[in-house]
């Protein structure tokens, strides 16, 4: 049993782009806010902006308002 203070909290981000919509099953769209595990995907930097490339299966949840 681990105390709450030692558990990793999920990260939060905004979808900036999606792959081929015909192959996607989740219904994610540009602008959606999502939760994902801390150590997932691949970080890249383009023109000073850090982006995270990940598989849609790594998304834990879509945040709805």
Image (cartoon, rainbow, N blue to C red):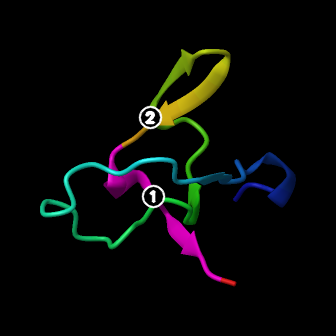
Residue displayed at 86% across by 52% down = 5
Q: Quadrant of residue 63?
A: bottom right
Q: Count up the numbered dots.
A: 2
Residue displayed at 31% across by 71% down = 26
User: Is 12 covered by the magenta stretch?
Assistant: no
Residue 49 vs residue 12, the one in the foreground: 49
Q: Is the residue 55 above or below the residue 30 in the image?
A: above
The span picked out in magenta is 55-64
Q: Is the residue 45 above or below the residue 23 in the image?
A: above
x, y percentage for residue 19? 27, 48
Residue 36, labelled with which disc?
none
Residue that protrudes farthest toward the left in the picture: 22
x, y percentage for residue 32? 55, 66
x, y percentage for residue 36? 55, 53
Q: Earlier in the sequence, mark 2 or mark 1?
A: 2
Say which element carries label 2: loop
Instruction: Identify the image quadrant of the C terminus.
Output: bottom right
Residue displayed at 33% across by 46% down = 55
Q: Badge 1, how many Cα within 10 Å: few under 14, some, many 20+?
A: some
Residue 44 vs residue 60, the one in the foreground: 44
Q: Is the residue 43 above or below the residue 16 in the image?
A: above
* Residue carrying label 2: 41
* Residue carrying label 1: 59
């Amino acid at each position: 049993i681990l105390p709450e203070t030692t558990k990793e909290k999920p990260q939060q981000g905004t979808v900036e782009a999606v792959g081929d919509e015909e192959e996607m099953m989740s219904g994610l769209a540009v602008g959606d806010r999502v939760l994902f595990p801390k150590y997932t995907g691949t970080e890249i930097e383009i023109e000073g902006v850090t982006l995270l490339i990940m598989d849609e299966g790594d998304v834990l949840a879509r945040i709805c308002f």
